Image (tube, rainbow, N blue to C red):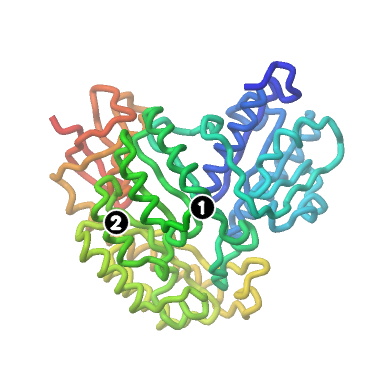
Amino acid sequence: MKSPGSRLANKKFFIHTYGCQMNENDSERISGLLRDEGALPEDSIESSDIIIINTCAVRQKSEEKFYSLLGRLAELKRKKDITVGAVGCVAQLYRSGLIEKKPVIDFVIGPDNYGQIQDILAKQTDEKIVSTRWRSEWHEVPSHIVHRNGKTSAYTTIMEGCDNFCSYCIVPFTRGREKHRPERNIVEEIRQLAQGGYLEIQLLGQNVNSYRDPETGFPFEHLLEKVNRIEGIQWIRFLASHPKDLPPSLARTMKEAKKICHQLHLPLQSGSSDVLKKMGRGYTKEEYLEKIRMIRFHMPDMSFSTDIIVGFPGETDNDFEQTIEVLKKVRFTNIFSFRYSPRPRTAAAKIDDSVPFAAKRERLLVVQDVQKQIQLEHNSSLIGKTEKVLCLGKSKKDPQRYSGRNEAYQVVNFHSEHDVIGQFVEVRITSCGPYSLHGAIKS
């Protein structure tokens, strides 16, 4: 940590994060950089000097929530002297236009420029600052600086950006083209995390399957094998995977590397090959299902989660029914489902958004109802069985109630007379709902 003479020393900051795990990891890095300058984290916006909003532009709803928060901050700024910063995907998308639209914002920083945040905040000036220049080099934040939100499970970013340009997706415009982190830096960070007592690692990237070490050219499987050999780490997860880039060699690596969880997030988006073609996904429904069969051939116990978009322009009733058929055939352990909303600069935004909002809403409800029943049936089948669970926290209401996740990444709530946070425990499942399992530590 820097000396008390730092301009940020004892400044109180609050970070509000929207979006995915990568945004969460970015916020951990930003928090670490500010703490390294002597700034102090706060639990509330009202008591902070600096408010940083880490934004998500993937869906319109996240952007709307961001603008709503800015309205609240504008009221607060009239009452006290605060600095407001917008970082992340919305910041990168709109750049200086964001400040013109929302003058409550004092600075805008894109995902490639987080390393400048200390210097920007240390400048005692009323000038608005925008830093959104793309960089070809990887900016490494020392692992010891990153302030992790948990002490048991940690995120490790292995790449940024995406080269796929799916027609509906804004990521290439907000995160840029693919940029891969050196394997040696990734491995060293995970070694340090293992030495710090972390048991689970989640490798992050927009498309981890396409990862290649920029120094050696070694593929993602090579990185997984090296991480699997790190002493202390017991569970390895990764996301997100693109179906078109998932080779049999990755399935074999997952089977052979014993620490890799048999759980995979494999975004489907639609069960219609016609819609998938319009989305620019690079695979058909049949090819996606073949990937599922191939992985389950190697690992019959594999648990899958996925993403579903309903109401993409031109989606017919028949297209939608095909999505429902895939849900019933694969029987995902969990899904993330959304109504399509056009995003700026994407190819799909130029297509007539022909599916009425009411139809999108109804289709989303059908997807969620079908999936809810699938999850309830699956969870019910686990009653009476014992699950290995990594305990991540405790209930605020019941001191003997704990929560964690099993290998399939399902939430497991359980009773324990002893504090088992940060430990693997064997939990006998006694009941369930569609979204969680319930039990007690096996005696």
Q: Quadrant of the N terminus?
A: top right
Tell me which residue sits at (69%, 17%) in the image: 3
Image coordinates for residue 368, horizontal then vertical, percent: 38, 62
Mark 1: few, some, or many residues within 10 Å (few <14, many ≥20)? few
Per the image, label 1 sits on a secondary structure element best described as loop
Q: Where 234 falls versus 4 (above or below)? A: below
Question: Splitting the image into 4 quarters, where does residue 322 fall?
Answer: bottom left
Q: Which residue is mark 2?
A: 253
Image coordinates for residue 321, horizontal then vertical, percent: 37, 78
Calculate the distance from the C-alpha at mark 1 to the C-alpha at mark 2: 22 Å
Q: Can residue 403 be seen? A: no
Label 1 or label 2, whichever lies nearer to me, is 1
Question: Splitting the image into 4 quarters, where does residue 404 fall?
Answer: top left
In-image side of 440 versus 312 (left or right): left
Tell me which residue sits at (47%, 68%) in the image: 309
Tell me which residue sits at (60%, 61%) in the image: 177
At label 2, the amino acid type is Thr
Residue nearest the observer in this picture, 280 or 324:
280
Q: Quadrant of the C terminus?
A: top left
Residue nearest the observer in this picture, 435 or 131:
131
Mark 2: few, some, or many residues within 10 Å (few <14, many ≥20)? some
In-image side of 252 versus 23 (left or right): left
Q: Where 418 falls versus 290 (above or below)? A: above
Q: Tell me the tag on residue 215.
A: 1
Image coordinates for residue 356, horizontal then vertical, percent: 56, 76
